Amino acid sequence: MKEAWSEWLGQSAGIAEMFLKMRWAVLVSEKPVFITSDNPVLVGDMLGPHRGLKHPDAMVTFPLSPTRVLIMDNRHSEPDAQFYPLNHDPAAINLLIWRNAMEYMFSPRNPDEVCAEIVAEAERTGVA
């Protein structure tokens, strides 16, 4: 176990450099609408299986608070270090966070309301 830990720590500087090279943006809501979970950091691709942090479709989603979500991606054609207002239903972001949860979802709103939004979004996008 100590050997595995040491190997992981040896790789962490490279992983940190990959994160720093990504575009960072914060999605902002005026109201507390974003959930979090017992496994809140989502690392993956929006269009398929995860193909690494350097892949153009790679994305990291991290809920910071009920009103803020950090999104890191490789969309370098878009401005970096921006705050973007939430101009749509939060269900798409909440669906990503919920799908990554191990066991628990934490929400500032009634969980029944959040789950109903997530189900509607999943049915709308065909991931249900």
Image (cartoon, rainbow, N blue to C red):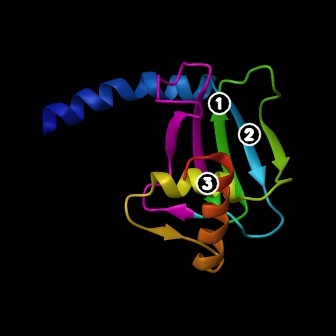
Q: Which mark is residue 25?
A: 2
Q: Are marks 2 and 1 in contact (CB under 8 Å)?
A: yes
Q: Secondary structure at mark 1?
A: strand
Instruction: Between label 3 and label 2, give the one nearer the viewer.
Output: 3
Instruction: Between label 3 and label 1, give the one nearer the viewer.
Output: 3
Q: Relative to residue 22, is residue 91 depicted above or below?
A: below
Q: Position of residue 90 (x, y in %)?
A: 72, 58
Q: Which residues are magenta?
A: 36-63
Q: CA distance from mark 3 to mark 1?
A: 22 Å
The answer to if 90 sits in the magenta stretch is no
Amino acid type at circle 1 is: Asp
Amino acid type at circle 2 is: Ala
Residue that mark 3 sits on: 122
Residue that mark 1 sits on: 73
Q: Residue at x 73, y 63 (%)?
A: 67
Q: Residue at x 13, y 39 (%)?
A: 1
Q: Position of residue 93 (x, y in %)?
A: 65, 52
Q: Residue at x 43, y 62 (%)?
A: 38
Q: Are marks 3 and 1 in contact (CB under 8 Å)?
A: no
Q: Relative to residue 80, is residue 89 depicted above or below?
A: below
Q: Earlier in the sequence, mark 3 or mark 2?
A: 2
Q: Relative to residue 128, is residue 112 depicted above or below?
A: below
Q: Position of residue 6 (x, y in %)?
A: 22, 31
Q: Earlier in the sequence, mark 3 or mark 1?
A: 1
Q: Position of residue 73 (x, y in %)?
A: 65, 30
Q: With 70 as the anchor, is 105 left or right in this view? A: left
Q: Quadrant of residue 58?
A: top right
